Amino acid sequence: MALTRFERFLASVLRVAVGMLFAVFQLLAQRRGADRSVRRLPPITNPLLRVPAMRLARMIRRREVTSVEVVQTYIDRIQEINLLINAMVKDRFSLALQEAAQVDKLIEEETGGEDVLEDRLPLLGVPFTVKEAFSLQGMPNSTGLVSRRGVISATDAPPVALLKRAGAIPLGVTNCSELCMWLESHNRLYGITNNPYDLERIPGGSSGGEGSILGGGGSVIGVGSDVGGSIRIPAFFNGIFGHKPTSGVVSNVGQFPPASGQQPGFLCTGPMCRYAQDLLPMLRVMGGANADRLSLSSEVDLKRLRFFSVPHDGGSPLVSPVDQQLVLAQRRVVERLEADLGVKVQQLKIPQLKYSFQIWSAMMGAPGKDGKQPTSFAELMSDHGKKVWPLWEMAKWTVGLSKHTVAAIGLVLVEMFQRSQPTQLILQQKESLQKDLEELLGTDGVLLYPSHPHLAPKHHHPLFTPFNFSYTGIFNILGLPVTQCPLGLSEEGLPLGLQLVVGKQQDRLSLATAVFLEKTFGGWRDPGSIATATTQLDTWRGASTTAS
Ligand SMILES: CCCCCCCC/C=C\CCCCCCCC(N)=O
């Protein structure tokens, strides 16, 4: 499916036009000269904020700390940082403290011992946060739509209910992009969320509020969803871990918008967290009985796995080239896997990945098995049945009268030109990529692949590179589980990271690799305590030069 000469010409014209628009945008942004003297968060001072969730649960069970103390510590941190990052959009702090007090009482009265509590309530007393697109009883569930202002959840989405049933205590809900379909977590109801490593940058989307609150140390575990990268992109930009599980393991019920057409096979609900060791137990809880399909208790011997490294998508003209710092970080991972585990990492190029965006967008718009088209973005955006007319809405937006973001209006516009059926060519391309990757990965393969071509961009910049998310989106269509793993910080002090892709139902392999990489590269860093990472990058550069 090589691009025709005309398509290549069009792509070049588009690149030049977008480049010019971007230059104008940069100029205007400079002239506006937004003076944000506070660019970083205050450092974390309370050591409790640096304890992984499962360890917190153990400390609470052993009465080394009370749940009230832990919950209050997180409330304090959120109150300290949320004005700067605008990540949590509605809290339930007083209820959370009451629930924590009940937990402490229960532990006080428990006579069966710690093991009984661990089996029954593995997350007892540990606070967590939830993307606002999920139902959490008593909390808003607008997904950033002004027309859904005032929608309050009467029940809990199943994964949220399972976490609560495991004893975890929700602190509140976090921001997302309008209808969960953009890289920037911005909407007209709650405003824009900032990246904790640099407030002028985006936290990613759509689970950007989760990414930001977790990255900023205001939460230790959270719930996100991902149909094109919405767990992995915010996890990457905010230096935390995120896992998009094998499709169908964690329920997608109870989130807005619901997936339709073939999208239920692509949308995944999954865990986001600051410590790699929390991913697996969270997945076990959130998957309920379905988690048994993943043999999560089986030991993983990393030395017996086959590793592959794919440095880029093969050069899609729609997508930016991968940042050199990310290329270097991925190379460093290869070196450490080979040196520390004694494995041989195979370098690969997978040329079909070049069509990731075309495959993702065609499959997202494809009719379901029942022949029904998915609900259009325009319908989802409609205000109590009143349809959105994109050109009119865009005109209103230019004078500040629209209730929608420019990205959402742009998506309705793009949707107008989309085919209702994927072409035979796209279907073949998807099938062949699926077959090749599944054969390659089998039951013991791990593929290293960039998470995104850029480090966390400045606010609004993704408007000029809208197709870059295809680095993550393609794995939704292929239904493969992926763990997003942080790899330290860049020269600018921004998180570096990598995707770990594995075969269906082999989630435990990427989760175990993430634990190894956390030990090797240091995992999440407190954004309030970083000076500059130049020395680390310089060391890597030195190491790679010596190696080559
Ligand atoms: C005004 C500019 C708008 C341009 C629109 C260009 C079209 C790009 C197409 C799709 C972008 C979707 C981004 C998806 C991000 C992650 C979604 C998710 N929930 O996982």
Image (cartoon, rainbow, N blue to C red):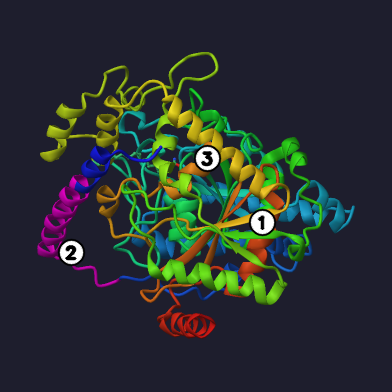
Residue type for callout 2 = Ala
Percent x, y for residue 130? 52, 46
Disc 3 C-beta below 8 A from ligand 1: yes
125 lies left or right of 532: right
Residue type for callout 3 = Asn
Q: Nearer the viewer, mark 2 or mark 3?
A: 3
Q: Quadrant of residue 108?
A: bottom right
Compute the Cα span from label 1 to label 2. 41 Å
26 lies left or right of 317: left
The one of 515 and 134 positioned closer to us in this rendering: 515
Q: Is residue 510 magenta?
A: no
Up the image or down, 292 lies above or below 41; here it is above
Disc 1 C-beta below 8 A from ligand 1: no
Discs 1, 3 touching: Cβ within 8 Å: no
Residue occupying the point 54% across, 73% down:
332
Disc 1 or 3, which lies upstream in sequence? 3
Compute the Cα span from label 1 to label 3. 18 Å
Q: Quadrant of residue 461?
A: bottom left
Q: Which residues are magenta?
A: 13-38
Q: Which residue is mark 3?
A: 476
Task: Say if residue 405 shows up in the picture.
Answer: no
Up the image or down, 260 lies above or below 268; here it is above
Disc 2 C-beta below 8 A from ligand 1: no
Residue type for callout 1 = Leu
Q: Which residue is mark 1?
A: 511
Residue occupying the point 66% across, 64% down:
515
Percent x, y for residue 190? 33, 45
- Per the rendering, the mark at residue 34 is 2
